[in-house]
Image (tube, helix red, strand yellow):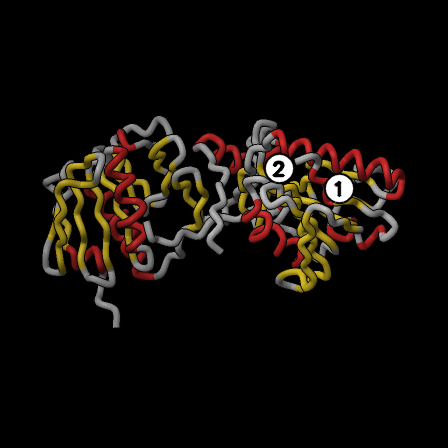
């Protein structure tokens, strides 16, 4: 049916009040994208392992230098709030994290690659998130996006297995793509 | 952007909670359609006048035989609560104080369509049929006619008639009540 319905869009504030009022609950895995409340894709093993691995490495290696937020909120704009798989935040954490607090966003993309690239990435760039990594399990690589601008990231690199990478904010911390992706799936 | 996103849908209860806690306010002209909160099109003066005309005609001729509900919600299902232009309801002593009327209470549902014709035909009518609303009229202001939808089946109405000016029609529930299309549409 090709009839355009105008959806009632919500602000981040209204979205938070839905949680406070119990309309959105703990079992809701959702994000707010341009005022629309969108269901997140489910998390498989590779995805979970990757987030757990990165959380552990970042917590151990960046103690005191970054706050590690796995699957926590990041308010992007007045009507967009994402829940990235992992965010490195500038310490100390004193408010709802916003792009100004973010040092690195990591999205683990198993089933969500098109959504991460097509929907989330442009919004991270527009909001000025300095660096995004998309872990592409199917393609066995990590995509690194740097230098945000209003029309996307200027600097894009795709690092395959065997390669390594460091966050711009922490050049001393090198991570292997093989460790990020985990063992090859049969 | 060609990426399909799955929207979080809301139940009628969640939708009501949004109003109770002030997330949806009086300035929101919305309805709940299949769990999505949809903005309604603005009402023009011709649309408003036909709604008032229908209210006067139906209230005057039916008296206490039906409650005439104007631009109020109908609880169609767990995930749909549209706001309908005019509805004839089965009379109840409390005038539906306890909960919004449901399809079983609905004797005739009328939508007045100026800019909303495609939406009324394509989105609302099929859902009224699924919910087994026995009869729907769409007053087509641009087309100067009334479309009558009867005999709901799961995906639409089996019996559809378009009555132009000069014609007349009676609701199934009130066969003795005859309304002229000209009376409904008002002067050209």
Q: Which residue is mark 1?
A: B99
Percent of width and height locating residue A182: 22, 61
Percent of width and height locating residue B106: 77, 49
Total residue callouts: 2
Query: Residue drawn at (19%, 35%), measured in percent from left and top?
Result: A149
Q: Which residue is mark 2?
A: B17
Percent of width and height locating residue A41: 39, 55
Marked residue chain, label 2:
B
Is B69 situated left or right of B92 in this image? Answer: left
Marks 1 and 2 close (CB-CB < 8 Å): no
The residue nearer to you, when weighing B146 against A80, is B146
Using the rendered image, report if marks 1 and 2 lie on a common chain. yes
Res. B169 visible in picture: yes
- Secondary structure at badge 2 equals helix
- Residue B12 quadrant: top right
Query: Residue drawn at (75%, 41%), measured in percent from left and top?
Result: B99
Is B65 situated left or right of A143 in this image? Answer: right
**Quadrant location of the C terminus of chain B?**
top right
Marked residue chain, label 1:
B
The residue nearer to you, when weighing A148 against A88, is A148
How many residues crowd mark 1 within 10 Å: few (<14), some (14–19), many (20+)? Answer: few
Query: Residue drawn at (58%, 37%), measured in percent from left and top?
Result: B30
């Amino acid at each position: 049916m090709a009839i355009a319905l105008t959806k009632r869009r919500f602000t981040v504030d209204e979205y938070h009040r839905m949680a406070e009022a119990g309309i959105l609950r703990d079992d809701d895995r959702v994000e707010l994208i341009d005022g629309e409340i969108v269901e997140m894709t489910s998390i498989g093993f590779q995805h979970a392992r990757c987030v757990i691995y990165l959380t552990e490495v970042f917590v151990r290696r960046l103690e005191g230098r970054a706050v590690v937020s796995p699957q926590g909120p990041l308010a992007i704009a007045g009507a967009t709030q994402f829940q990235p798989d992992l965010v490195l935040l500038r310490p100390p954490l004193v408010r709802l994290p916003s792009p100004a607090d973010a040092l690195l966003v990591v999205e683990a993309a198993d089933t969500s690659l098109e959504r991460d690239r097509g929907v989330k990435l442009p919004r991270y760039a527009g909001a000025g998130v300095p660096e995004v990594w998309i872990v592409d399990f199917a393609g066995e690589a990590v995509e690194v996006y740097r230098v945000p601008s209003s029309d996307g990231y200027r600097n894009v690199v795709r690092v395959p297995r065997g390669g390594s990478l460091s966050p711009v904010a922490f050049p001393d911390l090198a991570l292997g793509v093989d460790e990020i992706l985990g063992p090859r799936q049969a | 952007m060609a990426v399909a996103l799955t929207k979080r849908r809301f139940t009628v209860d969640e939708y009501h909670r949004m109003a109770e806690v002030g997330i949806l306010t009086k300035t929101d002209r919305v309805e709940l359609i299949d769990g999505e909160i949809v903005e309604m099109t603005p009402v023009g003066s011709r649309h408003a006048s036909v709604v008032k005309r229908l209210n006067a005609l139906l209230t005057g001729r039916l008296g206490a035989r039906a409650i005439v509900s104007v631009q109020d919600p109908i609880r169609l299902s767990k995930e749909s609560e549209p706001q309908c232009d005019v509805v004839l309801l089965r009379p109840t002593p409390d005038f539906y104080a306890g909960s919004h009327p449901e399809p079983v209470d609905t004797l005739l549902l009328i939508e007045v369509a100026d800019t909303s014709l495609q939406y009324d035909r394509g989105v609302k009518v099929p859902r009224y049929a699924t919910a087994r609303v026995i009869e729907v009229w769409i007053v087509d202001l641009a087309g100067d006619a009334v479309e009558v939808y009867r005999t709901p089946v799961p995906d639409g109405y089996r019996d559809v008639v378009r009555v132009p000016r000069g014609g007349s029609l009676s609701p199934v529930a009130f066969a003795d009540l005859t309304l002229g299309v000209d009376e409904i549409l008002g002067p050209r």
